[in-house]
Amino acid sequence: MAPSVLPTIVALSSAPGRAGVAVVRVSGPRVRFVLETISGVVPSPRQATFRALRDAAGDVVDQALVLFFPGPASFTGEDVAEFHIHGSRAVLARLLGLLSSHDGVRLAEPGEFTRRAFEAGKLDLAAVEGLADLIDSETEWQRRQALRQMDGALGTAVAGWRQPLVEAQALLAAELDFSDEGDVEGPLVERALQLAAGVLAGLRDAQRGFAHGERVREGFVVVLAGPPNAGKSSLLNALARREVAIVSPVAGTTRDAIEVRLDLDGLPVTLIDTAGLRDSDDAIEAEGVRRARDLAAKADLVLSLRAIDSDADRDHPGGSVIALATKADLGGTARPGELRISARSGEGMPQLLALLVRRLAGEEQPEPALLTRERHRAAIAEAV
């Protein structure tokens, strides 16, 4: 039986929607045929060529830049073509329909280009995950971490752990099988244990960075907690730099959690405003308080607010806490350990932002983590 031939796949590689330019990518054994049929030529490798794209009747579909990347030196390891067309929905629909009308050519399934790159050995699984994270990245720290994964940092580290273990296995085999031979000398078992100990130290270093890597990838959670009228909604609006929450002198205005996604000096942060912490006979407000306590207990960091002109005792919901004395523009004295801030005047806000970054990122601004997913953590734990 003749071996099956993979179909040639085609897909939009740029973002969907109306744009100045859209990129359509084709990969597979019929790429050269498609190029000759649609553009009339197979361009020189990696040189952009301006061509009219025509249908079977010779009518022009669009004018485009055409590129050809012969395999195996391409993203997928196969012949690859790119058509840089005008980003019109009509042009895109017409070109995709024209390309997929040829025998052996079909629309790609989600992630199929990357899957072919993985199967061709162009990317390992961790690099594929890094590529997905890079596409999804929203902040500078996420970009750096994803780029490191995509560049093969974890694969390189794993190879570095594997090599001494293979050497240790060889030493142990020599000790077991040839210990009575005159040309096998030295404390082989001790050397094997030293090699294994070095690998173990590296694995544990990687384990320690997992929690931070996971938070950078998924985002840190910071909860604003405190009694009613402590200025939580005002602080949320000030940090978000827009009106997100209703600010009112009436106690209990916020009854459910309000979430805002922020880029905080490159760190992805979900900021959550919660109901004021107090005892209440109102069933809805009481449920809001319960949810507030639950969120604070699970947060990476809690901003515990107390109005500077209030004598209220601070409610400690648990977790890592930064104590804030709000409404500093009203005067008053902060208690020991509190940071004076005012969402209205801006007093203390730069110091709060700097403190948030230090507490979330760590004092030393570490290198992007090697382990960023639960799959990575589980595999390293098993190896340890």
Image (cartoon, helix red, strand yellow):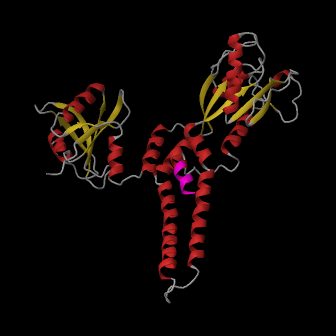
Relative to residue 41, is residue 10 drawn left or right?
right
Residue at 69% from the left image edge and 23% from the top image edge = 292
Decide whether the magenta segment is chiefly helix, strand or loop: helix
* Span highlighted in magenta in the image: 378-384
Q: Position of residue 77 (x, y in %)?
A: 30, 52
293 or 144, which is in the foreground? 293
Residue at 68% from the left image edge and 16% from the top image edge = 287
Q: Determine whether 14 is above or below 28 in the image.
A: above
Residue 75 visible: no
Q: In which quadrant is the C terminus drawn?
A: bottom right
Q: Position of residue 380 (x, y in %)?
A: 54, 53
Residue 88 visible: yes
Quarter of the rendering containing residue 230:
top right
Residue at 14% from the left image edge and 51% from the top image edge = 2
Residue that extends furthest to the bottom in the rendered view of this protein:
182
Residue at 22% from the left image edge and 28% from the top image edge = 94
Q: Position of residue 119 (x, y in %)?
A: 33, 51
Q: Position of residue 315 (x, y in %)?
A: 80, 26
Q: How many marks?
A: 0
Relative to residue 37, is residue 159 drawn left or right?
right
Q: Determine whether 324 is above or below 50 in the image.
A: above
Relative to residue 354, is residue 35 drawn left or right?
left
245 or 50, which is in the foreground? 245
